[in-house]
Image (spheres, helix red, strand yellow):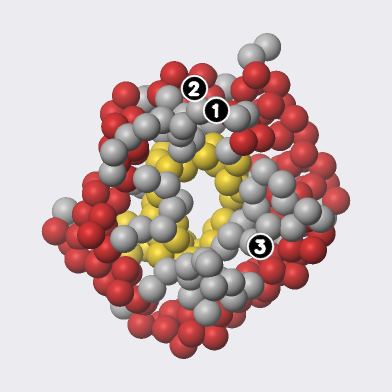
Amino acid sequence: MSEIGSNLLRLQDRIAAACSRVDRVTASVTLMAVSKNQPPERITEAAALGLTVFGENRIQEARAKIHLCSSHLQWQFIGHLQSNKARDAVSLFHTVQGIDSATLASEIQKQAEKQSRRMRVLLEVNVAGEASKFGWNPERLLSEISTLQLLDRLEIQGLMTIAPYCADPERVRPFFRRLRELRDRCAERLDRPLPILSMGMSGDMEIAIEEGSTLVRIGTALFGDRPPIVLSE
């Protein structure tokens, strides 16, 4: 069995065990393959094993790779998106995670209208208040969520966060719990479900799943360490 195949089996076991601990069905969690720095051949190998959702965080790299891969794959943008790259993000991706400001949301709305598209988005929340990370302050998001809902080209699917790095994953549990609670409050404001909680990566995905994650973003634990693809931005 290939390295990716072996890694995927281990990840599936981890997801199943975490779901079992909190009485969730395994199918309620989507494994996103974070394919940044991975060549198309490795993506094709992962897709052949049944993975369909892939995450990229650089527009230039995604533009170079997506057309070389199967057309049935779903691509999501998971990095920090600059407003001047919104047009490309709308044309390339199924979903843009990491909408971190009203300004960026408005730009995505404008570009989606120009391209006659509706764009699925997740709103990024800086739950821990880290200065080095992007995202809404939770209370500010609550105050702005109803206005964001008026952007009719955007389909707000849920929330995402990047938890602080901790050697002990248990220490990030409160941040995942806060995002779930915030999602529930936002859904109440909008009077509709927000089904997606994108939280949890290779080192902390079990804790995220136990706290309600529906999508975990997995790179190294799936693909292993790989030399970066060098592409000019």
**Residue 200: % across, % down:** 65, 53
* Labels 2 & 1 near each other (Cβ < 8 A): yes
Identify the residue position indicated by label 2 in the image: 42
Q: Secondary structure at mark 3?
A: loop
Residue 170 drawn above or below residue 230: below
Q: What residue is rendered at 68% in x and 65% in y?
A: 176
**Residue 167: % across, % down:** 78, 53
Q: Secondary structure at mark 2?
A: helix
Q: Residue furthest left?
A: 114
Q: What residue is rendered at 44% in x and 19% in y?
A: 41
Q: Is the residue marked by circle 3 packed among few (<14), some (14-19), or many (20+) residues within 10 Å?
A: some
Residue 165 drawn above or below residue 217: below
* Labels 3 & 2 near each other (Cβ < 8 A): no
**Foreground residue among 116 and 124:** 124
Residue 213 visible somewhere in the drawing? no
Q: What residue is rendered at 68% in x and 57% in y?
A: 165
- Depth check, mark 2 against mark 1: the one in front is 1
- Distance between the Cα atoms at labels 3 and 2? 29 Å
Residue 85 drawn above or below residue 123: above
Identify the residue position indicated by label 3 in the image: 164
Identify the residue position indicated by label 1 in the image: 226
Image-quadrant location for residue 156: bottom left
Residue 116 drawn above or below residue 134: above
**Residue 56: % across, % down:** 43, 43
The quarter of the rendered structure image containing the N terminus is top right
Q: Amino acid at mark 2?
A: Arg
Q: Secondary structure at mark 1?
A: loop
Image-quadrant location for residue 64: top left
The quarter of the rendered structure image containing the C terminus is top left
Q: In the picture provided, is 114 more to the left or to the right than 40? A: left
- Mark 1 / mark 3, whichever is N-terminal: 3
Q: Amino acid at mark 1?
A: Arg
